[in-house]
Structures are given as C-alpha cells and as structure tokens.
Image (tube, rainbow, N blue to C red):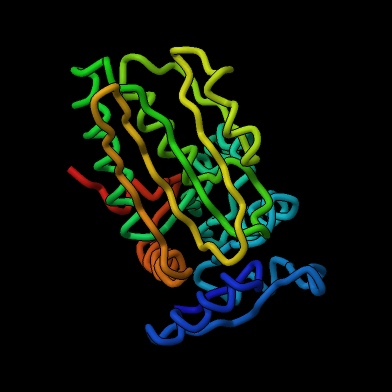
C-alpha cells in the first residue's frame, strides 16, 4: 500500500516507521514547510492518506484528498464542527474518509466498555461521575478528543447526565465541582510534560469510588491503529468512524 503522510511531526514519524515495518511504502510527506506540495497530482501517487497535522490545516488537507479522490484516515482533532458537512460530501463521493479521536486498539476497547459501564451505573444514581484527562503540554486542544468521546459515551448511556463541561487548569479543576450542575459531566483537563495520554472515568459515592483508566505508555498504539485504519479503508466509499472498523458487539 502506498501512503501519503499529511503531518510529519512526532506522530507522523512513528506512523512512517510502523507502516514501513508492515511492508507499506511512504510515497510523500507534507509538513508545515512544504504545504504547497499538497496537490492532486502528488496525492494520487498514494493509495491512502493518513492525516495527523493540526486543527488549523486539517480541513484543507481533507478537502485536497476529497478533490483528488484519495481515501483519508484522519487522526487530527479539534475540527468536529465540520463533521456534518463533510459526512454529506463524502456520502456523495467516490472516495472515503475514516476519522477517530483515538485510533489505539486499547482506547477503542476502553470506549466500548465505558458505554457498557455507564448503562450499568444508571441503576445506581447515588454515584456521580466525572472524566479526567492528562496530556503533554504541546497538545493544542482541550479537552482531548478522546475525553470528549468518553464523555459522549457516558451521556448517551447514563440517564443523569445531559452535557459535558471542561476545566483545563489545576486551579479550575480544584474549584470546578462548585460550578457543575447535576446534569453536567465534568471533564478535568491537565497538561503535564511528556505524558502521551491518560484518561480516567471516576464514579464516586459517599461510601466508595470506582475508577476506570486507560494509560498510554507511548504514541505507538495510536500510530499502529492509524495504519490498521488505512489498511481497512482500502476499496471503501463513504464516511466512517473508527467504530465501523472495530465493530464491537
């Protein structure tokens, strides 16, 4: 499989290594210093593009892939307000897009169990719930896309919560409980050097607490999942999320 890498930062470099280890070929790479090379002609050298750039460039990169008819796997977050429009465009197109807030196999297992747990906890309303996420200080968006997916999975399955709110700083987090309504789900966000990503769901009552946690040791799991997604999307048309790929029952 021939792959175009759109975004060649830390994640792009790990994706490149894993893709080559899996016998794929990287035909070209786009970063901030050669964005002008993102043309239909260059894209069409690839069977698929993997997009891990920035919230500021992702929509243009997706549009270029759509115009070139090249399927794209999108791992960049912070652009989801455009999902409805892009879904409509891709459902009319002859190519495909697959996006995820997190491509890690372990995280997607976590997402699935999180929903099951939330349905179970609806029977025990004396537990309150919140989400905590910790990432490296270079992460540009808050809360993380992964934390939003976790929160939305809880809201869809837990009767007591209707929306999520976010507190980014430690100081805010320490006082956030005073400002959270009963039907709101708090996402506490922390930024600490060199943390790839830790997400925790906490159910707390007067008598005990239940914690459900995923800790990434490095970025390799995210990168492997993105390459697996690129393999999966081959020959498909339309608009997909990572749930379509994993299809947990």
Task: Report the label total.
Answer: 0
Q: Quadrant of the N terminus?
A: bottom left
Residue 234 visible in this rendered orientation of the protein: no
Against 128, is 213 above or below?
below
Please give the name of the residue rendered at 35% of the width and 14% of the height, measured from the top-left corner.
160
Against 201, is 11 above or below?
below
In this rendering, would 24 be left or right of 124? right
Please give the name of the residue rendered at 60% of the width and 62% of the height, measured from the top-left corner.
52
Please give the name of the residue rendered at 78% of the width and 68% of the height, measured from the top-left corner.
32
In this rendering, would 36 be left or right of 82? right
In this rendering, would 128 be left or right of 5? left
Against 211, is 126 above or below?
above
Q: Residue furthest front?
A: 207
Q: Position of residue 130 (x, y in %)?
A: 42, 31
Image quadrant where residue 111 sits: top left
Please give the name of the residue rendered at 56% of the width and 18% of the height, measured from the top-left corner.
178
Q: Position of residue 125 (x, y in %)?
A: 26, 15
Residue 108 visible in this rendered orientation of the protein: yes
Q: Quadrant of the C terminus?
A: top left
* 42 vs 5, nearest the viewer: 5
Q: Position of residue 212 (x, y in %)?
A: 30, 44
* 98 vs 210, nearest the viewer: 210
Q: Position of residue 76 (x, y in %)?
A: 59, 54
Image quadrant where residue 10 sits: bottom right
């Amino acid at each position: 499989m021939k792959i175009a890498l759109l975004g060649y930062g830390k994640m792009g470099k790990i994706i490149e290594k894993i893709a080559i280890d899996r016998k794929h070929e990287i035909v070209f790479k786009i970063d901030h210093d050669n964005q002008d090379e993102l043309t239909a002609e260059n894209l069409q050298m690839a069977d698929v593009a993997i997009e891990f750039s920035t919230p500021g460039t992702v929509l243009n990169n997706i549009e270029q892939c759509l115009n070139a008819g090249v399927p794209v796997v999108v791992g960049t977050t912070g652009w989801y307000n455009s999902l409805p429009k892009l879904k409509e465009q891709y459902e009319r197109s002859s190519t495909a897009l697959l996006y995820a807030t997190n491509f890690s196999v372990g995280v997607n297992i976590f997402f699935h169990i999180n929903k099951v747990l939330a349905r179970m906890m609806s029977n025990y309303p004396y537990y309150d719930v919140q989400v905590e996420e910790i990432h490296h200080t270079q992460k540009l968006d808050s809360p993380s896309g992964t934390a939003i997916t976790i929160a939305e999975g809880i809201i869809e399955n837990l009767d007591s919560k209707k929306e999520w709110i976010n507190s980014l700083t430690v100081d805010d987090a320490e006082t956030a409980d005073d400002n959270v309504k009963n039907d709101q789900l708090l996402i506490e966000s922390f930024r600490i050097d060199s943390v790839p990503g830790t997400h925790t769901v906490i159910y707390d009552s007067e008598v005990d607490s239940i914690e459900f946690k995923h800790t990434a040791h490095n970025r390799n799991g995210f990168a492997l999942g993105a390459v697996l997604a690129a393999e999966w999307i081959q020959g498909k048309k339309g608009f997909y999320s990572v749930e379509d790929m994993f299809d947990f029952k």
